[in-house]
Amino acid sequence: MDSVNLVIIGSGCAGLTAAIYAARANLSPVIVAGTQSGGQLVTTSNVENFPGFPEGINGFELMENMRTQAERFGAQFLSSAVERSDLSEKKLYLDDQKKFKAKTIIIATGASPRLLNIPGEREFFGGKGVSVCATCDGIFFKNREVVVIGGGDSACEEAHFLARFCSKVYIIHRRGQLRASKIMADRALAHPKIEILWNTIPLEICGEKKVTHIRIKEGERERDLPCSGVFLAIGHIPNTQVFEGQIERDREGYILSDGAYSSIPGIFVAGDCCDPVYRQAITAAGMGAAAGISAERYLYE
Ligand code: NAP
């Protein structure tokens, strides 16, 4: 088992910012980056609200820049994931058989897209019409009609992006009002190719080899809406299952924190795994910086 100063679990905005701070403080952090480094932002098209980029920046590029910055100061990245943990001993067991005993740990594992759990969703997932990422899959639906489920910023952003390629984009939302911020909502409402179906619930995603339609319930009425793609944008679930029973979490699984501090001394948290409220790239980055600084202070005190 390797002994290290600091293991950072996660390579999204929070993990990478923590890595930059910790590496600059000479802690030689090891980052357990997962198979896809960069977190949720690598699937975002243009990030318009990260300060310092007046024209916006591509999400993938932003994350690549952060990783390069962390590597420049000596952060070591592993393309593996934590399979098992013993947080009370600060021991981590990775899926590539590596084991670490760390003096400090920063948990920045982020969150994953929530699923609807309706018939057809899993069956048509990945290449057959159901997706959680318009940036990744939108191009496959050129000149087709598609559906986006949800009423938040993600749903509006996904719909706006898809409207570039698709002939028509329906937003299916279960309420009569969008949850999205005003600027995102206004953009969706004003777009000639986007139509919002209010107070509508998806019941089943249907097709043969690929999606052909979605069965929906509008008020009391059920009907089939023809579409080739269904994009889910209904929020996220924190990636904290591997720590279940070892650290204090809320009912939804978000790790409880006081600033960067978790319920265990020497274990710090940052980003979407502990933030059900803001969930922004910049807030995750800020929390990552706080976690990096806190880990450094803990080690030197
Ligand atoms: P969100 O704000 O939690 O919205 C999720 C949406 O999905 C809500 O409208 C919710 O309906 C709906 N929903 C949840 N479960 C559902 C179900 N089982 N069936 C049908 N609908 C369901 O999530 P988000 O849009 O992913 O945004 C998360 C955070 O990221 C927010 O803070 C947002 O501001 C931020 N974000 C920012 C940007 C940007 O600024 N560029 C882009 C994307 C996301 P209800 O409204 O009825 O609850």
Image: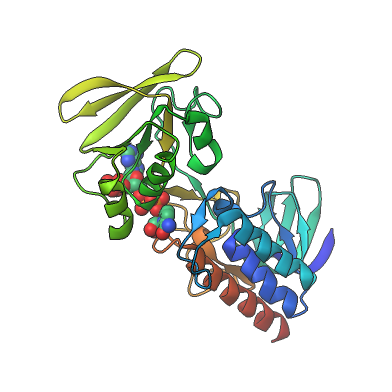
In the picture, the quarter occupied by the C terminus is bottom right
Q: Is residue 169 at all visible to an observer of this figure?
A: yes
User: Which quadrant of the figure has residue 99?
Assistant: bottom right
Among all residues in the image, which is located at the extreme bottom?
Answer: 301
Q: For residue 38, which quarter of the picture?
A: bottom right
Q: Residue at x 50, y 67 (%)?
A: 50
Name the side, left or right, on which 62 lies relative to 275.
Answer: right
Residue 176 against residue 67 in the figure, above or below = above
The part of the image, by quadrant, that contains residue 110 is bottom right
- Residue at x-position 77% and y-position 66%: 71
Q: Is residue 100 above or below residue 208?
A: below
Relative to residue 26, is residue 172 drawn left or right?
Answer: left
Residue 135 relative to residue 118: left or right: right
Locate residue 183, reporting x and y percent.
Answer: 31, 59
Where's residue 124, x and y in %? 49, 23
- Residue 100 in the image: state x and y as whole percent: 78, 59
Pick whichever, 103 or 12, lies toward us.
Answer: 12
From this viewpoint, which residue is outermost toward the left?
Answer: 220
